[in-house]
Amino acid sequence: INAEYMGDEVLSLRIMATAEMIKQQLHGLMEKKSVEEVKQFLSWLLDDSVPQPVCREVLKELAALLLTDDESRFEFQKAVGHFALEELQPRIVSFQEESILIRESLAELYDAEDDWSMVARTLAQIPLDSGSRAGDDAYKLQHFVKLATLYIKMDDHVEAERYINRAGQLVQEGTSNDFMLLKYKGAFAQIQDYKRKFLEAAIRYYDLAQVAKVEEDQIFALRKAIICTILAEAGPQRSRMLNTLYRDERSSKLEVILYKSLEKMHLERIIRPNEVDELKQFLSPHHLALLPDNSTVLDRAVTQHNLLAVSNLYYNITFSELGRLLGVTAERAERIAAKMIAEDRMKGTIDQIRGLLEFSNDPSAALVQWDAQIQQLCGLVEGICDAIVANHPEFEAPLAAALA
């Protein structure tokens, strides 16, 4: 093809015609499933004698041909894809876009085999600082969120956080892709969960429960928000989150043990050991990992919660008695109380000489809680009355008279 003696339009037609003929050869070789023959073909194709426009068209076709649902062809397709990338490496500047397409096709093959490690390794080598993708923020966001999600699946939350932080920079600059924004929020919440930043994770999960388009996704996120709130360290922020979740009508439709635990924690009632055991079925493996003191995050959260519940029942208590109520030693009960007081998550003073914990309870707080419980009861009664009237309109007048 000699560009010197023909116009642009004629040249374009000749390039397309040549590319089509070579594509047909490629189709035939791919059908034969002969790795060596395809390798010889690609070596010839990427020789300097073949014009770059022709090479680009054929390589794009190769990327499309690599995609298949036939599992018997996976190994052949992967071998061809990897060889093509090796051959392209010396000329990557000229064929960067085609290299990206081949990598994406390879990633799809590994994804079909649930080989998350190879999917991540393949996609991570896509250059985003040069070429056509350098200015495509939407593609970058999708790419970073995809990689973060893959590393979460592999339990590599250090790498996941690295990519989700890069995605976060693009989210802050604004995006119109609602679906990708939801995926970003979900991945971010999972990473906070794994890092044991349970309160932050709960807030993110609850945000997802509010904006997710599918009801199933809303319930999943709400359940995660409740679990993370239960696992969070006791304190005012956690209490506010418990209140928010408890008032959400959807919470009462979840599993009974989960809702009952949420209710008890919101109302600051003591959680019993058998209830702690029942909660474990909702936890992920990293929730049950042992802390330095040989307890789990669930044990820690329940112990701190029970200590706050005890503070509503007692003006003061000995550490030996407190340890008995919490199911821990007196020394550990003292350490927990001291930490919560120091972090301003509980009001009180410690008398080490007498081995006594004195709670600085606000008398008005009990009245406020009592008022809230009365208000909640009235709301439930009103809901029952509305349900009765909806199903039996003839009772509307008698009920109205009784409530007047």
Image: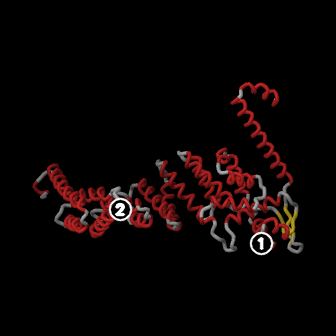
Specify the color scheme. secondary structure
Q: Is residue 327 visible?
A: yes
Say which residue label 2 marks: 106
Which residue is drawn at the image coordinates 57% and 58% (left, top)?
189
- Whether residue 46 is visible to the viewer of this picture, yes or no, is no
Element type at mark 2: helix
| Identity, as a three-letter code, of the amino acid under mark 1 | Arg
Q: Nearer the viewer, residue 404 or 339?
A: 404
Q: Residues within 10 Å of mark 1 (few under 14, many from 20)?
A: some
Image coords of residue 58 (percent x, y): 23, 58
Q: Is residue 313 left or right of residue 392?
A: right
- Circle 1 is placed at which residue position? 332
Q: Residue at x 82, y 60 (%)?
A: 311
Residue 254 in the image, given as x and y percentages of width and height: 64, 49
- At a point 49% along the width and 53% down the height, the residue shown is 173
Height in image: 395 above or below 288? above
Label 1 residue SS = helix
Which residue appears at 63% of the width and 69% of the height? 289
Q: Amino acid at mark 2?
A: Leu
Q: Residue 225's mark?
A: none
Q: Mark 2 and mark 1: span between their CA atoms?
A: 54 Å
Q: Give the quadrant of residue 334.
A: bottom right
The crowding category of the residue bearing disc 2, from other C-alpha atoms within 10 Å (few below 14, some 14 to 19, many at least 20), is many
Nearer to me, 110 or 311: 110
Q: Position of residue 363 (x, y in %)?
A: 86, 53
Quarter of the image where one finds residue 131: bottom left
Q: Quadrant of the C terminus?
A: top right
Foreground residue among 359 and 221: 221
Compared to residue 98, the image places residue 254 above or below, namely above
Rendering coords of residue 152 (x, y %):
51, 63
Q: Quadrant of the N terminus?
A: bottom left
Q: Outermost residue toward the front?
A: 72
